Amino acid sequence: MSALLEVRDLFKTYGSGETATRVLRGLSLRLEAGEMAALLGPSGAGKSTLLTILGTLMKPTSGSYEMLGVDMISADDRALTDFRNAHIGFVFQFHNLLPDFTALENVIFPVAVREGRETPAARARSRDLLVRMGLADRIDFPTASLSGGQKQRVAVARALMNGPELVLADEPTGNLDRASAMQVMDLIGEINRKEGTTFLISTHDEKIAASCRRQIEVGDGMVTG
């Protein structure tokens, strides 16, 4: 494996003076291409802040971050937006789908925004992803009519739409029952094995963590194991 990304000595402080809250305290982490890793730690340990920085949605107070050989700290906002759209996918606990859009429209949305239109190739890929997610019979259903597990599978398909090298997932199964959660994780594992997509999954669930090949412990703003 080769390094997909590496961060060194990340600090992130919110506020200043007496109200300052230091969330990351010199955190360092290296992820290899093709890894499937769980990010573990108690609430307040800095997991969500780390994912936000890795997703280029926020910059650290100090430290270094390189992904695919690109310096994410010195890049401007436009460059970060372009990089994020091309190389990073996101899956959130509350899936953030557009309820009046169909499953297909939700999955195709990232490409439609980037290209300014829906292309035949994008429609074909979005259909293929939904079929692989076991949603062939729900492609044209509004997402408001889908179950929680089905919505999360749509969210995973959307995250994969642009063929990202990295998918960041923040408690992606937190609102699902056990059967639905493991189904989503099985699909994520299949994508990881077959396509080599790197996944970093924040979770409090020991069974979800055990389904990942690497477990990364975060505590008090640093990697502890």
Image: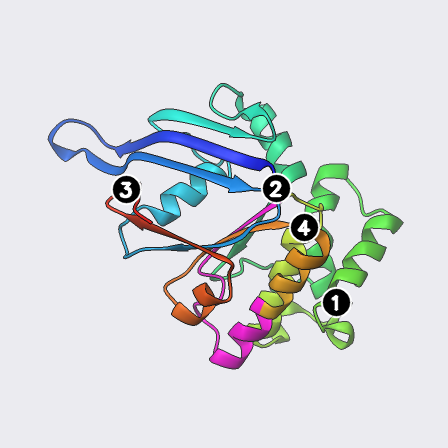
Upstream in the sequence, badge 2 or badge 3?
A: 2
| Residue on which the image places disc 4 | 196
**Of marks 1 and 2, the one in the foreground:** 2
Based on the picture, tell me whether residue 176 belongs to the magenta stretch: yes
Badge 4 marks a residue whose secondary structure is loop
Upstream in the sequence, badge 3 or badge 4?
A: 4
Q: Seen from this angle, which residue lies furthest front?
A: 1
Q: Nearer the viewer, residue 192 or 202?
A: 192
Structural distance between the alpha carbons of marks 1 and 4: 16 Å
Q: Is residue 218 left or right of residue 89?
A: left
Q: Quadrant of the N terminus?
A: top right
Structural distance between the alpha carbons of marks 2 and 3: 27 Å
Q: Residue at x 39, y 29 (%)?
A: 8
| Residue on which the image places disc 3 | 221
Find residue 1 and name its label.
2
Image coords of residue 178 (percent x, y): 48, 79
User: Where are the magenta residues, as a range?
Assistant: 166-185
Q: Residue at x 28, y 57 (%)?
A: 42
| Above/below status of 86 relative to 199 | above
Q: Nearer the viewer, residue 135 or 37?
A: 37
**Of marks 1 and 4, the one in the foreground:** 4
Structural distance between the alpha carbons of marks 4 and 2: 11 Å
| Residue on which the image places disc 1 | 132
**Of marks 4 and 2, the one in the foreground:** 2
| Above/below status of 54 relative to 139 | above
Q: Are marks 2 and 3 in contact (CB under 8 Å)?
A: no
Q: Are marks 3 and 1 in contact (CB under 8 Å)?
A: no
Q: Is residue 143 left or right of residue 120?
A: left
Upstream in the sequence, badge 1 or badge 4?
A: 1
Q: Amino acid at mark 2?
A: Met
